[in-house]
Amino acid sequence: FGEITISEAADLSTLNYFDKAKEKPAVALISVVLAANRNYNKVVEPNIIRIEQTNLKSFTQLSKLVEEKTEAEFYSFWGHKDEKKYTTLKKLLISIDKLKSQYPDITKDFELMNKWATTADLLNRKNDLIGSIPNIAVATFQHLRMVFGVDTVKPDQRVKEVLVFEFGCKRLSDEKAIKAVEQIANITG
């Protein structure tokens, strides 16, 4: 964004942030799963752009796609041959079905995930329906919450670098880095 304040850059980068997830929550879910430990711009984004051109929108459609395609066919669809991510996606879809049972009045996928995201507790992540899924680490947990409507942060390398450089916060755990950013946000508005 050029030479502007962090606050201005944050405001610009979050314009319409949730629009894609509202329109195509299934694609948003795939995007978060594929993004874990990957260079998003180089490895994930080209596949997401291609998937966005399909008619895939809902979690029901995604579940059906996973059921109907072989594992190899699905790898071809989403552009990655990664059994761990594939298993994570399948477990997420099972957890989402459980959320649908818990909140039968919520019929829109984005609203369902937003309900989860706003009530999910980072510090109790291991006891959470989604946070307890193997391979859903702190960053992916937070990324899911962000994509589905929560104003928070995930503890990536750049966030931690800013905390060290600007605030002298060294060797913070992921959870403490998130809490530090939340406190800074609360103080600065």
Image: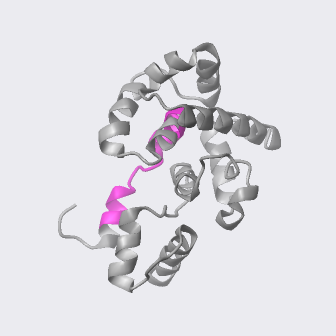
Describe residue 111's horizontal placement relative to residue 147 as left or right: right
Examine the structure image and report whether residue 19 is included in the region drawn in magenta: yes
Describe residue 46's horizontal placement relative to residue 118 as left or right: left
Prevailing secondary structure of the magenta residues: helix
User: What residue is shown at x 39% (from left), y 64% (from top)?
Assistant: 157
User: What residue is shown at x 53% (from left), y 28% (from top)?
Assistant: 57
Work out which quarter of the rendered image holds the N terminus and state it: bottom left
Image height of 125 relative to 114, above or below: below
Percent position (x, y) of residue 132? 70, 51
The magenta-colored residue range is 9-29
User: What residue is shown at x 36% (from left), y 44% (from top)?
Assistant: 40
Describe residue 175's horizontal placement relative to residue 123 as left or right: left
- Front residue of 98/68: it is 68
Percent position (x, y) of residue 69? 57, 15
- Front residue of 19/137: it is 137
- Front residue of 34/120: it is 34
User: What residue is shown at x 49% (from left), y 33% (from top)?
Assistant: 27
The extreme left residue here reads 3
Total number of numbered discs in the rendering: 0
Percent position (x, y) of residue 8? 31, 68
Percent position (x, y) of residue 101? 81, 38
Image height of 160 relative to 113, above or below: below
